[in-house]
Amino acid sequence: MKKLNLAIIGQGRSGKGIHGVYYRSESNKYYTVKYVVDEDDYRRELARTLYPGCTVFADYRALFDCKDIDVVVNASFSNQHYPITLDLLQHGLNVLTEKPFAKSRNECETLIKTAKANNAVLAVFQQTFYAPIYQKAQAVLASGILGKIEQISIRYNGFSRRWDWQTLQNRLGGGLYNNGPHPIGLGLGFLGFDENISVLYAKCACTALTSGDGDDYAKVLFTAPAKPLIDVEVLSDDAYADYAVKIKGGKGTYVSTQSDYKYTYIIDGENPPRPYVEGTLRKENGDPCYCSETLIKHEESGKFEGTPFDVGTSLLYEDLYFAITQGRKMMITPEYAAQIIGIIETAHALSPLPCKY
């Protein structure tokens, strides 16, 4: 299998610590890191060690003179995703851009149109969709075992503070842009990326934990006609975050963390309907009593084998390879990624924060 020549822009936490780990792993059967771009001298020299034989540049525009690039990965600062990706696409290059895709849905649509106009493949690094945490939840939903689903809650919460560039609005920082594309994306996926989705409620706040002016508290509710309510939280001030995904149906509940899952459900016929009693329930001696019974329930549990950072990353890159070499449609399209940004953009419009920097 012929490997594709890859160029990566950015050697920060994502470029080096997520993408780079994949490039150097046994899972990478598809790509050769040919070019590395970073403004920092130290990072460029380190890249020579990490990817022997690669060529390094300080400016991504040097890539335009290289005629052997099959795909460029844009792992630059978040506020640079849009302008750099646009420039790359206008030069006819295939691009995998980190999330967030862009600041607004309009910017996303511009990138999609530019890719089509230049016959280029455009993808967004939304690797959580390929990971067991999403795939297992979707399988349980598809089984119907939980009955009619009324609400799905997704929590990307923790109790910590930040003081880096990703806390700044002018860098496209804040929790919703940084981590929000994962839970917002999962919620949209659970709704089948319905085009009729609407945001019902949003609250964004900047608490005492964060040094910048970006949100570190975000609550967003959205749904679509005849679909479940999606309840998303991206909080940095939650000291008791105990689950990542909870699916509540009429016959049971599914809950998972990032590492394991469990669900409890009932089966039709095993708990016959109880006749309705009008008035007060009474014990045999005549004392009033409360409804009480032991339902016949079933429980299943397990651990996920892999995370978005290993399994998810590997499968996304495999999907990208065949999109470039065989023209296959990727599981998560740029249009889906644009919907994610649309929800985030709407949430910020409903609950804006002042820009301080």
Image (tube, rainbow, N blue to C red):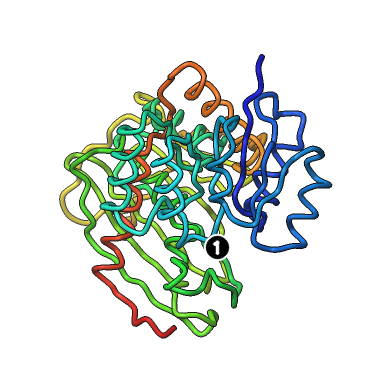
Q: Closest to the observer: 310 or 101?
A: 101
- Report the residue marked by disc 1: 241
Q: Residue at x 47, y 72 (%)?
A: 216
Q: Mark 1 is on which residue type? A: Ala
Dividing the picture into quadrants, the one containing residue 330 is: top left
Graded by Cα atoms within 10 Å as few (under 14), some (14 to 19) or many (20 or more), the crowding at tag 1 reads: some
Residue at 46 percent across and 52 percent down: it is 84
The answer to whether any part of residue 186 appears in the image is yes
Residue 233 image position (x, y, % from top left): 42, 61
Residue 190 in sight in this render:
no
Q: Position of residue 207 (x, y in %)?
A: 47, 81
Left or right, residue 80 beside residue 49: left
Identity of the residue drawn at 31% across and 52% down: 107
339 up-or-down from 170: above or below: above
**Could you say whether the residue bearing mark 1 is in a helix, strand or loop?**
loop
Q: In the visual, does 318 lie left or right of 129?
A: right
Q: Quadrant of residue 348?
A: bottom left
Instruction: Please state the horizontal and vertical placement of residue 172, each as a whole percent of the image.
Output: 44, 66
Determine whether 64 is above or below 322 in the image: below
Q: Residue at x 22, y 46 (%)?
A: 197
Which of the image's four quarters has the C terminus? bottom left
Vertically, is 285 above or below 356? above
In the foreground, 122 or 198: 122
